[in-house]
Amino acid sequence: MRLTASLLLFLMLVAPLPLLAAEPDLESPHWSVEIKGGLFHPDLPDWSRYYDSRWMPGYGFAAAYKIIPQIDIGGSAGSYSKKGHRLNFYHGTPADSQTYELNPLELFIILRGQFVQDQWVIPYFGGGWTTLYYRQKLPEGTVRGSAGGYHLRGGIQLSLDNLDVGASQKMYSDYHILHTYFILEAERTKVIEHAASTDLGGTAYFAGLLFDF
């Protein structure tokens, strides 16, 4: 009985529900655009000591071409920023303010677990190259530079098409958007700044929207 119940739950998640689905697609999507926001935890030593938090808020954009429905190649750009302070040399109390910014550029390949059309939940995994542009604003001036490395990412897409069939049809008629998804994603970045032997990477968690054209 447990096996049967688990199988039924799986089919409800991945199989389309004909009674709720919009009209069948007459074409397959070739492009996707992604908008997301989230939090980034840098691997920099003593980060929390100088910035009073483990996290940097930020956002990102991505565009990808679908080789086949299960494989995307694309690029993305993002921005993170956090204000903090330096510590007094003698007392260890907060002194001058400072701001740290990161702007990643990425090239990636994504593998998606899409098996049927109108699938409600689609897991995905991927990775690729990353270049991080950093900037630290200090009272005496600005330090900036860049370093290269790689990233790995994974998450799930939750289909929004069947939640509001009318809205889905209007998105197609007005903007030619075939599918809309809510996404949840985690990403791990490894980028070494060799001059200082410092890892500028870290772990990020995102939520956002993905549109298939």
Image (cartoon, grey):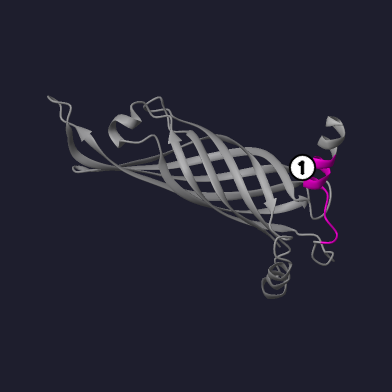
Label 1: state its secondary structure.
loop
Residue at the limit of the structure toward the front, as seen here: 1
The reply, left or right, for residue 134 in relation to residue 108 is left
Location of residue 158 in the rendering, given as x and y in whole percent from the top left corner: 68, 50
* Left or right of 20, for residue 145: left
Residue 140 magenta: no
| Vertical arrangement, residue 187 with respect to residue 58, above or below | above
Residue indicated by mark 1: 113
Left or right of residue 42: residue 109: right
State the residue at coordinates (72%, 74%).
173
Residue 157: in sight, yes or no? yes
Residue pushed farthest left?
Answer: 90
The percent position of residue 110, horizontal first and vertical second, equals: 69, 43
Q: What are the residue bounds of the magenta stretch?
A: 8-19
Give the amino acid at mark 1.
Gly
Placement of the N terminus among the 4 image quadrants: top right
The residue positioned 60% from the left and 49% from the top of the image is 75
> For mark 1, does the 10 Å Cα neighbourhood hold few (<14), some (14 to 19), or many (20 or more) residues?
some
